[in-house]
Image (cartoon, helix red, strand yellow):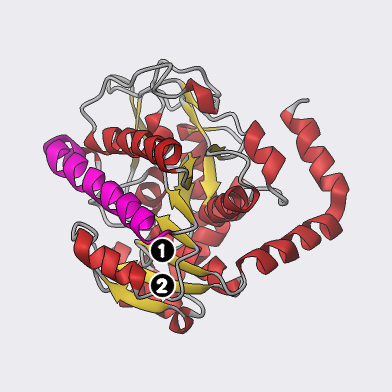
Amino acid sequence: MTGGTRGADRRRRGAGGAGRRSRASEKHWAGKRVVVTGGLGFIGSHFVEQLLEHGACVTCVHRGEKPEVLEVLPSANRARLLSLDLLDDTALSAALRSVTPRVDLIVHCAALYGNADFKKRNPALILDANMRMASNVLRAARACDVGDVVMMGSAEIYSELAPSPAREDDDYRRYPVPTQNGYALAKIYTEMLAEFFRTQYGMRIFVPRPTNVYGPRDDFDASVSRVVPSLMNRIARGEDIEIWGDGSQTRTFVHVRDVVRATLRMAESNRHHTLNIGTREEISILGLAKLLSSVFGAPESIRLVPARPTGPGARTLDVGRMDELIDFEPTALRDGLEETARWYRRTRYQAATAG
């Protein structure tokens, strides 16, 4: 069955089917005790928000104070906020034991991340910190008899040699990833460790692999520099957008809210241990720059740099498994970017233009 047919079939099911399954999700998570690490971060804060909406009792584990997130995070006052260093395994175990009678789900979103320069200069720091956090979370989850564990993965575990779109079994086991990227290596290590814990100890562990994630509350700091925030900052400042190569390389982007919804469905169904999360809506990097300029109502100030490296010509994910699980239509890219732009104007525009 083609992707278009699957999408049309889902639309024919209508809002009634989606509503019934959404109510089933609310029933599933209502009263559950959930711990979200990195709960004030980009993806983590959306897990906190949706789980609270479903009636879960949420402990939001964070390391740094982020009042700007708490100000815009609906119902944050209903979450238990817990400042904790995940590299301290004793403190983590004690925190899990303090959630009574038990923790039903851990969603591990915390990670040490950075832009290309930071990753190039700090591969040992990134790999070591992220490996130890993953190990500590899994060992504490086992010791405290946690029901389900989600370890947020990444599409970065796929080699440039893997086919596009890449299926879940086209991963590092079939196409090894020759890289000095400590972040990508840590994600691979996390998946391997999750598989060993799953098979040796019988734990229910899920690893979603989202493609390029965007949406409100993204990190617009230059030290992180994901593509959508980076382009938005440049447009807001009236700067030229520099695109390496001819801009024809294609990618897919997925709204953060859809990542959370698909991941929760993954845990509810317990059908797949790994899951690609994305859309079939491919766009070239040049097309993305033009689309964002249109969303901001700004002129297309784009400069191509043909001599610079571009990465693979296409990097997309096969989302057939996700189609089988979800009960919603993924957010259209323009709709999601317009929503993100509205949030950006409310919360980030003044700081960006002053920078």
Residue that mark 1 sits on: 36
Does 120 lie within the magenta span?
yes
> Mark 2 — residue?
59
Residue 260 seen in this snapshot:
yes
Q: Majority secondary structure of the magenta segment? A: helix
Q: For label 1, count other residues whose C-alpha is less than 10 Å away and answer few (under 14), some (14-19) or many (20+).
A: many
Question: What is the x, y in percent for residue 121?
Answer: 12, 38
Residue type highlighted by circle 2: Thr
Q: Is residue 128 left or right of residue 137?
A: left
Callout 1 amino acid: Val
User: In the rendered structure, which segment of residues is drawn in magenta?
Assistant: 117-145
Q: Secondary structure at mark 1?
A: strand
113 vs 52, nearest the viewer: 52
Distance between mark 2 and mark 1 Cα atoms: 6 Å
Q: Residue at x 36, y 23 (%)?
A: 311
**Secondary-structure class at tag 2:** strand
Q: Position of residue 27 (x, y in %)?
A: 69, 68
Residue 295 horizontal/vertical position (percent): 54, 53
User: Please, is residue 257 above or below residue 59 in the view?
Assistant: above
- Mark 2 and mark 1 residues within 8 Å of each other at the beta carbon: yes
Residues 7 and 291: in front is: 7
Q: Is residue 270 left or right of residue 170?
A: right
The tag on residue 323 is none
